[in-house]
Image (tube, rainbow, N blue to C red):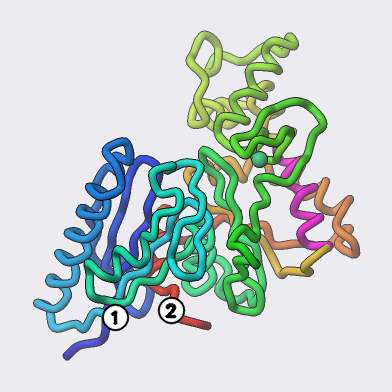
């Protein structure tokens, strides 16, 4: 027999990706399909099961043992594998997904919050390899967070540790999906960035040619920022300042070694960095004038699958 392989799955609001990952963190094979949560839980479970078994059989045909499935899920996960809450995939609320998959697959199934799976991937094989304690911020539709403390995922008493996206940053009434107002996510998530751009334009800041007359989107904002657009640069400057302030609070509490950014919106980090470092330096105790690692993740969109596959691996 050759070396063992691991199976990882990244369950997203739109797509589900299941992959075969080797012991060195390389994604060897990938199967992906639409999540279609509107069709209910069981069709989704059927699809995860068939993709997992397909990849397991493939690995075995190639002479590898398969050690089990790890799955990252957008929601709060109880230790027994029940999804206690999933705002983006409501059909998963209270679903004993871990137990169902274990029974159907007849293999070990480990579950984690998706941001924690991203954090774990970056911690073992990516940008945070040299760190024992760090925060991974996932920038996408929302703003998620995964904490690794002393080389262990810290998910907290109820599974909701690291939710930096729901730290309040502004008194203004931007309503968040969590029910509160003024959360970091309402400024640094994709729709928050667009909302800020619209309000700046409404306030009279004139956008450059890239944004003018176009339907706003995050990729368009990034392109506009590359062209020095005043609206786009101000959006990223404002959101960077808020992010830096939240990260300062996290560092003041936990004294972590760095922060890694992953997720579909992570490329905006370059434009947020200057203001983020300024507000971070002003508010993080003992860090004024010091370099603090605020890093782009190295595994890209595969961090979640690679981390999920290796949930049982400790550094
Ligand atoms: Zn919130």
Left or right of 52, for residue 241: right
Whether residue 22 appears in magenta in the rendering, the answer is no
Q: Quadrant of ligand 1?
A: top right
- The span shown in magenta is 239-252
Frontmost residue, 181 versus 39: 39
Quadrant in the picture for residue 229? top right
Q: Is residue 274 visible?
A: no
Q: Earlier in the sequence, mark 1 or mark 2?
A: 1
Residue 20, placed above or below residue 270 = below
Q: Residue at x 89, y 58 (%)?
A: 288
Question: Does residue 250 show up magenta in the picture?
Answer: yes
- Residue matched to label 1: 67
Camera-nearest residue between 15 and 236: 15
Who's the residue at 53% across and 18% down the image?
210
Label 2 environment density (alpha carbons within 10 Å; few <14, some 14–19, many ≥20):
some
Prevailing secondary structure class for the magenta stretch in the rendered image: helix
Give x and y (percent) for residue 213.
Answer: 51, 8
Q: In this image, 84 relative to 251: left or right?
A: left
| Residue that label 2 marks | 312
Q: Quadrant of residue 29?
A: bottom left
**Which residue sits furthest left?**
61
**What residue appears at the point 53 percent right and 53 percent down from the top-left corner?**
262
Helix, strand or loop under label 2: loop
| CB within 8 Å, label 1 to label 2 | yes
Between residue 113 and residue 199, name the one nearer to us.
113
Residue in view at x 51 percent, y 42 percent:
87
- Quadrant for the N terminus, please: bottom left
Compared with residue 145, is residue 224 higher up or lower down, i.e. above or below? Answer: above
User: Where in the figure is residue 133, as x and y percent of width and height?
Assistant: 66, 73
Picture layout, residue 69 above or below residue 39: below
Query: Percent position (x, y) of residue 71?
Result: 38, 63
């Amino acid at each position: 027999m050759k070396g063992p392989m691991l199976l990882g799955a990244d369950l997203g609001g739109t797509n589900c990706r299941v992959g075969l990952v080797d012991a060195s963190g390389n994604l060897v094979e990938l199967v992906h399909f639409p999540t279609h949560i509107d069709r209910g839980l069981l069709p989704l479970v059927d699809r995860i099961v068939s993709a997992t078994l397909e990849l397991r059989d493939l690995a075995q045909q190639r002479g590898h043992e398969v050690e089990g499935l790890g799955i990252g899920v957008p929601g709060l996960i109880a230790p027994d594998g029940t999804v206690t809450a999933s705002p983006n995939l409501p059909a998963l609320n209270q679903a004993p997904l871990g137990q169902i998959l274990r029974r159907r697959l007849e293999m070990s199934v480990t579950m984690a919050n998706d941001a924690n799976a991203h954090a774990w991937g970056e911690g073992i094989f990516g940008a945070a390899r040299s760190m024992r304690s760090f925060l991974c911020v996932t920038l996408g539709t929302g703003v998620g967070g995964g904490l690794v403390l002393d080389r262990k995922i810290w998910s907290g008493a109820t599974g909701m540790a690291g939710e930096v996206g729901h730290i309040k940053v502004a008194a203004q009434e931007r309503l968040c999906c969590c029910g509160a107002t003024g959360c970091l996510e309402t400024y640094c998530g994709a729709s928050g960035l667009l909302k800020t751009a619209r309000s700046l334009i409404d306030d009279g800041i004139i956008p450059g040619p890239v944004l003018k007359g176009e339907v706003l989107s995050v990729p368009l904002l990034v392109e506009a920022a590359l062209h020095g657009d005043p609206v786009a640069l101000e959006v990223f400057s404002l959101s960077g300042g808020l992010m830096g302030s939240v990260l300062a609070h996290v560092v003041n509490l936990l004294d972590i070694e760095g922060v890694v950014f992953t997720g579909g919106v992570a490329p905006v980090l370059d434009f947020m960095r200057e203001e983020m470092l300024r507000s971070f330096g002003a508010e993080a105790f003992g860090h004024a004038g010091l370099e603090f690692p605020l890093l782009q993740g190295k595994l890209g969109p595969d961090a979640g699958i690679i981390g999920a596959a290796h949930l049982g691996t400790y550094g």
